[in-house]
Amino acid sequence: MVERASWRNGARSLLALLGSVLALAFSLPVLVLGLPFWIVGICTRGLAKVLEPRILPWSAMIEFNPQIGWKPKPNLKVHGAGEDVFRIVTGADGWPGNTRMDEADLVALGDSFAFGFGVSHRAMFSELIPHVRVKPVASPGYNLVQELLILRQYSSQLSGKLIVWFVFLGNDLWDNLYPYMHFYTTPFVRRVGERGEWRIETGHLSPKTRPYEYDAKHRRRIWERLGDICSSSYLAERVFSACEFLIREAQLTCERHGARLCVLTIPDSAQLSPDGLERLRTHSSNPNTFDPGLPDERLLEICSKLGVTFVAGREYLTRADYHKVDRHWNERGHQRIAEILRNLHQAHCPEPAKTRPCGIGA
Amino acid sequence: MSIYILGISAFYHDSAAALIRDGEIVAAAQEERFTRRKADAGFPSGAVRYCLEQGGITAGELDQVVFYEKPLSKFERLLETYLAFAPEGMESFQIAFPLWAKHRLQISREIKQGLPAFSGKPLFVNHHESHAASAFFPSPYQEATILTLDAVGEWGTSSIGTGQENKITLSHEMRFPHSVGMLYSAFTYYTGFKVNSGEYKLMGLAPYGKPKYVDVILQNILDLKGDGSVRLDMKYFRYCQGLTMTSDKFHGLFGGPPRKPESVITQKEMDLAASVQAITEEIVLRSARHAHQLHGGRNLVMAGGVALNCVANGRLRREGPFEKIWVQPAAGDAGGALGAALLVWYHKLENPRRPRLPDAQRASSLGPSFASAEIGRFLDGEGARYEYFEDESLLVDRVAAMLAQERVIGWFHGPAEFGPRALGQRSILGDARSGTMQQTMNAKIKFRESFRPFAPSVLREFADQIFEMRPEDDTAYMLFVAPVRQSLRTPLSEEDLVKMEDPDLRVRVSVSRSTLPAITHVDYSARIQTVDEEQHGRYYRLIRRFYEFTGCPVIINTSFNIRGEPIVHLPEDAYQCFLATDMDCLVLENYVLIKEDQPQGLRDAGKRYRSSYMSTFSLD
Amino acid sequence: MAVFILPPPRRARLHAFALVQSVCVGVLVTLLARAAGMRYYVLPGIILGLLMILYGMGRPQATERLYRLWTRWAEYYGRWAKGYVLRICYNVVLTPVASIGSRMTGEGGDSMWVPRPTLSPLTYGSQYDLAYPGCSLRHFVISYPAWAYKSGNLWALGLLPFLLLIAALDHEKKESYSGHIYTLF
């Protein structure tokens, strides 16, 4: 601070005061002009706060699980935010809804799609199929490895059930190869040994969240990854090889315990619009071989080889079944999925579930 | 019970966080490494999270959080600046005032939002005192004279003081707008480089020119006093009232408008660079002499952005009055975070201090490190092919042999460096003896056109044999320049002499003028890093093995990044850089990846990363 | 974010917007009807308001379109108003004060080095070079006047209303400026 004659200070203060009063007077018309915006803005924000329920961030909805990395907390009755606010309800086991595993006819195994992310639980597919009790076993962020491990955990309760495995083509296929998701550690598969056999890794799982996102760039490269998976590429070879291993393991589990496995692929919304397809193609490392149907073809091959029922979601879903910005299904999309599951259940369990279980040979 | 103090610098350029525990540096990192945005100015949430994790604490367990400067003092300076130039200044005011209204005057709130679990009140220390603390407290000296030089903090642009045991005392300062840092930045702008980041390019350009503008500058723009202080004639500058550094009067003095970025560099720019560099060196030298006159002593410690001018530092070491000089490796504002934390520990909490040898900065290896297992998981996730070396000596053999074959190596080992220089933890390495390495590395690795040679890492025990420095001189942080010894210089042929007149500077720098052409500048200078085993461990052993293979104790060490991106942070960043460039080999801790061994599909993916880099990162 | 700018549309926000607009229009119409001398001047406002509420709640897409349009207009207003207020502040407050002169000195002499003290740790709680009552209060609306008084910058109080106004009007998310200038501010 520099010394200054007090008369200068006084003069400054006086000028500033007068100037300030004058400037406020000049500013007044501008502020008055903006009054409608202020009133509407303040009132809308205030009222919206009252009308909108409290939103819980995802990190607060999950807890560490030493076998699968993390799991939704049990008995949640909260709201999450996607494109809009939606209600989340989990049962005593932490899975969406209140259907118990032992009473379920159909188990929907998957990630955020099977979790019902983006719609309130009453609008979820699992609530829309009359006479069929659907048990979603899912969490946003899960990869197929985690879902397989969960399936194994429930193996003794699978008898007579139809297991529909939701496979989201957007990221499920390559997430299986990665040990991290955002700040969390996740199970993954890696090749070991001279023959390059796949092995599930869980030794690195930790309740401690990482101090930085390991895969922020990886997540931003989602277009490139999906573009590559829809093309002839090194990544595609690896992910489908890993998928084959995981589906085989799941099929063995189901066979051993009298359940029927079905794989249902869920296209990324980009695969359902011309703009999205073009963007994917340009991001592919081998655009000449780009084919948006390639993932379904490869998975169909795998499932046929293993005797697993396969349904390509791309044949039933359209862009209109997804939210505009958020990449999950809207309510119409859930209705579409409910129809698919109902048809599947009918096909594999033609008689009512209580009289005849559906399973191998049904 | 341990006391944890977190220092933060943010909101201008070079945000950073530093954590100390009982006066010991636990961790320090710059935010740009986490966000991948060069000179990121936002709240350093990534750096903070890392520091807390490294300290094993949560924000709620912090005892103190300290910000590296006094916002209201800075605001006062800003207002007085507008008052000095009004009615000019509207352009600048329209940008500055909203920033202050929303953020800068509410730093407490910003800190609270960034650290919601911290229940205390943040502290605020003076900017140049932060610099002074960062210079003195980690140094190995019980007492030292302090010299800080930068563009500006609150009011001060440079300061002189002393450090004794656990106290720093600043005695004098220069005040805004008279600033050696602003002077240098003005010429950086005028010669077509980016302000805040291109200053080191101006320093690198200087050897190409002749200081023929020195008199013009001293007679018009700058009154250089005998004690190193400067008075700038503000009619030549616009940084007070506008959004550019120089005024039309400045342009008229030097015969034209500023050079457009990425356009051809002419002899004028080279001569201007040489001139302002000469003046800056003189300022630094005179200031140091003045500080010595005031406070005496054998030791000098320095910080502030101008302390990164290693050419001036080299001259200070050779010609200055101090026997020993220590410069804070993170001499810019990032180091202010560290200094602020140390200031609180020693001044506020009045703790004793025991200087360490070689210093308390721990080779500036204060950033994140990654376990081998973690890296292995990542590489398997990518499907990369690698060799894993359990035995370090085999790893070092392998890599040193590749270096000797003029392969370019990406070296990722240990904790990341804190500060702008790569010091052997996140470095790209090459053979300094190669006549083509400078062009190869710039074009095929860095994706830039550069007139600057690379910097060398040299084994400490050979440093004085290769460079003109005393055996006892240590330059572990690449902050001093010294000439290559006469005995290693090679005479220039006729053809070489012709090339030295080429307007294309890349041709000039390609002329081989010593047995270490890749690191020798046109004036035979080199920006040196001395490497010893105690501080550098595996990096030292690598260079040692290279020496055993080749008889040369010097390798190229350039920062592990491409173009204008920040230095790599995660193994993923290093891996992408490896794939996107013509780098031959990547060493991630104990994993060695050879480019030609990678599956074709991965190499194809690398081409995609390359175009992404080119479009994302501009030349800095 | 400036409160007059509406946040991204969500169901609750759209409903709130529809309600608020309906009430505002209803009140406006009532006032106009009263000014026009109508007998039952309240009725038109109530009827119109109710109709708007029903329409707004029943046609969320139409409401969303209006919501987005309103937000865009608000952003235009904010930008224009901010520029205007800044110019007024600079020309009417700062420029007259500048006629008194500035504290930026350094006229010359043999040296530009000026003596400076090392700040006492007692000042570390303050965002200024001095410690003073109120200096460590979190909200600047309270600590700013204390600083202005104690530091001899009482004139800076004249800027306080404009600091608050600009903070309220500025809806850009920028935290810093980088261009062809050193980051002085």
Image (cartoon, grey):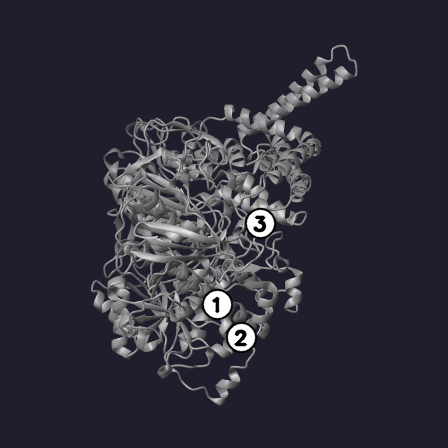
Camera-side residue: C49 or B556? B556
The disc, 1 or 2, on the residue closer to the chain's N-terminal end is: 2
- CA–CA distance in space, label 1 to label 2: 17 Å
Local crowd at mark 3 within 10 Å, few (<14), some, or many (≥20)? some
Instruction: Please tell me in which quadrant of the rendered image residue B539 appears.
Output: bottom left
The percent position of residue C8, horizontal first and vertical second, equals 55, 35
Contact? badges 1 and 2 (CB < 8 Å): no
Q: Quadrant of the N terminus of chain B?
A: top left
Residue under pointer 3: C104
Residue under pointer 1: B282
The percent position of residue B356, horizontal first and vertical second, equals 26, 56
Q: Is residue A220 above or below residue B111?
A: below
Camera-side residue: C128 or B28? C128
Residue extending farthest to the right is C36
Judging from the image, mark 1 belongs to the subunit labelled B
Disc 3 residue type (three-letter): Met
Disc 2 residue type (three-letter): Gly
- CA–CA distance in space, label 1 to label 3: 25 Å
Local crowd at mark 1 within 10 Å, few (<14), some, or many (≥20)? some
Whether residue B73 is visible: yes
Q: Is residue A127 above or below residue A271?
A: above
Secondary structure found at label 3 = loop
Which label sits in the foreground, 1 or 2? 1
Judging from the image, mark 3 belongs to the subunit labelled C
Disc 1 residue type (three-letter): Glu
Residue under pointer 2: B209
Judging from the image, mark 2 belongs to the subunit labelled B
